[in-house]
Image (cartoon, grey):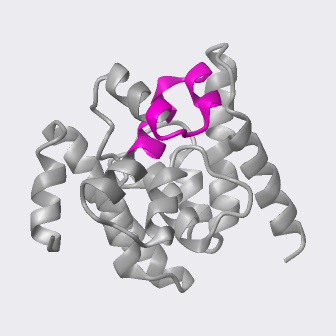
Amino acid sequence: MNRDSLIQSVREQMPERRWRHVEGVMETAVILAERFGGDPVKADLASILHDVAKYWPVDRMEQVIREEALPSDLLVFDKELWHAPVGAVVAERQYGISDPDVLDAVRYHTSGRVGMTLLDKIVCLADYMEPGRDFPGVHKIRELAEHSLEEALIAGFDSTISFLLQKGKRIYPLTVAARNDLILLSQNL
């Protein structure tokens, strides 16, 4: 499937406002890839696909998580996390994406993970700071992203964790582990 056909197919699966977010992530991810020595083509592809399952019904996502033996602990955490690993399955099965870097960037764009790859970081950070995002702290994240993916991502994870704490929600352990790993990495630089 060529890029235009992929875009058309993914775009049809979400409201127009979400597609504008995806476009913002695509633009931001390519900028970050060029800034930090990543692959802009892979960043663009992963960004196109990152929210492909975002508007699926919850029961359909749950079915994919169970049938594909995705981490079952997802099911006891916020459903907002589910579309990322489900999206990686969709990218592979429906769109024939076989590049593990791209699939992992889609899979971990909401949670992060220990040992995030450069592409993981780029897509996750682009999702946090694309131009359409407007939440307390986003300007700081954008400023940090001028010089450090890791520092900007730590600020992004801090924002997510703080939001979840304020709402009294559970925090997905992989997000805490990703944040801690990035702090360790930044201290060793």
Residue 142, x across and y down, in percent? 52, 59
143 vs 42, left or right, is right
Q: Residue at x 20, y 47 (%)?
A: 19
| The C terminus, quarter of image | bottom right
**In the displayed structure, would residue 25 be above or below residue 134?**
below
**In the displayed structure, would residue 150 be above or below residue 159?**
below
Give the image quarter of residue 76.
top right
The outermost residue toward the top is 168
Q: Residue at x 58, y 64 (%)?
A: 121
Q: Which residues are magenta?
A: 66-86
Predominant secondary structure, magenta span: helix
76 within the magenta span? yes
| The N terminus, quarter of image | bottom left
Between 155 and 86, which is closer to the camera in this rendering?
A: 86
Residue 63, x across and y down, in percent? 40, 27
Give the image quarter of residue 172.
top right
Residue 105, x across and y down, in percent? 49, 61
All told, the count of numbered labels is: 0
Q: Residue at x 38, y 64 (%)?
A: 46
Between 114 and 65, which is closer to the camera in this rendering?
A: 65
Q: Residue at x 33, y 67 (%)?
A: 97
**In the displayed structure, would residue 20 be above or below residue 167?**
below
96 within the magenta span? no
57 vs 113, left or right, is left
186 vs 63, left or right, is right
**In the displayed structure, would residue 18 be above or below residue 5?**
above
